[in-house]
Image (cartoon, rainbow, N blue to C red):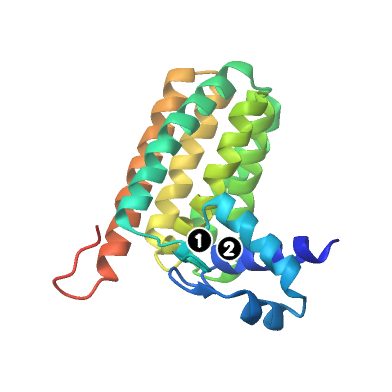
Amino acid sequence: MRASDRAYRALREEILDGVLAPGTALAEVEQANRLGVSRTPVREALARLEADGLATAASPRVLQVSELSAASITALYELREALEEQAARLAAMRRDPERFEGLRSRLQLSPGQLASGDEGGLRDYYDTVDALDAELDAAVANPLLIGALRNARLHSARVRRLARQHPERLRAAASEHLLIVEAIIAGDASLAAHATHVHLHMSLRHALASIEARQPDGHRVA
């Protein structure tokens, strides 16, 4: 793997996991020293992060980790509604039911696994969600839509982190995902799209409440 690819993956994962918090400066020299590579691959990695929307210009010569604000989250969910509701609708029409049966079984177990609050249950749930995304992509079979979905999911991973310390929201989300899968198995395109809409609505409400709770008293997020 090229040094620029390694740097990109490392920085991307740190941004998605919150290790590099929103607003953190991404200076070439500092990141090159930290990652043990030269400045050129770091420069290439930062350019890719900027193209992804995970980094923005703080000044003409310095990038920073993109802010995670109420406005940016709302914009993301506006995009997700358009993409994911259509994807669910198409998946219900084009799916192979057997490919979603295993996901249904896994999601039926998720609320109980998440109730324990341990990392293993959380990891299993997120693995199931990733598997659902992969099956949706396969069922949709539309490269342009899949490409747009993958970009939206990249940013959604940052927002998803806000729910990690809220097991009640995670259990509710698992039930919402289960309804989406059941609608797809049944071939009910309208229900699949509506279940997706409900899931995104509840996720957005929780994300905005989490962002609001992190602000100092009297200072609301734009």
Residue 22 in the figure: left or right of residue 32? left
Q: Is residue 69 above or below residue 91?
A: below
Residue under the image location 41 percent in, 45 percent down: 76
| Quadrant where the N terminus is found in the figure | bottom right
Residue 126 lies, in percent from the top left, at 58, 55
Residue under the image location 38 percent in, 33 percent down: 197
Q: Nearer the viewer, residue 184 or 38?
A: 38
Residue 20 in the figure: left or right of residue 10? left
Mark pair 2, 1: CA separation: 5 Å
Residue under the image location 70 percent in, 77 percent down: 32
Q: Nearer the viewer, residue 64 or 185?
A: 64
Residue under the image location 39 percent in, 27 percent down: 194
Give SS at disc 2: helix
| Quadrant where the C terminus is found in the figure | bottom left
- Looking at the rendered structure, the kind of residue marked 1 is Leu
Kindly give the residue lying farthest to the left in the view shown. 218
Residue at the disc numbered 1 = 114
Kindly give the residue lying farthest to the right in the view shown. 1
Residue 90 lies, in percent from the top left, at 56, 20
- Looking at the rendered structure, the kind of residue marked 2 is Gly
Residue 81 in the figure: left or right of residue 218? right
Task: Judge the density around disc 1: few (<14), some (14-19), many (≥20) Cα neighbours within 10 Å.
Answer: many
Which label's residue is closer to the chain start, 2 or 1? 1
Q: Is residue 127 above or below residue 30?
A: above
Task: Judge the density around disc 2: few (<14), some (14-19), many (≥20) Cα neighbours within 10 Å.
Answer: some
Q: Quadrant of residue 167?
A: bottom left
Q: Are marks 2 and 1 in contact (CB under 8 Å)?
A: yes
Residue at the disc numbered 2 = 121
Residue 38 lies, in percent from the top left, at 77, 75
Q: Is residue 127 above or below residue 26?
A: above
Q: Which mark is residue 19?
A: none
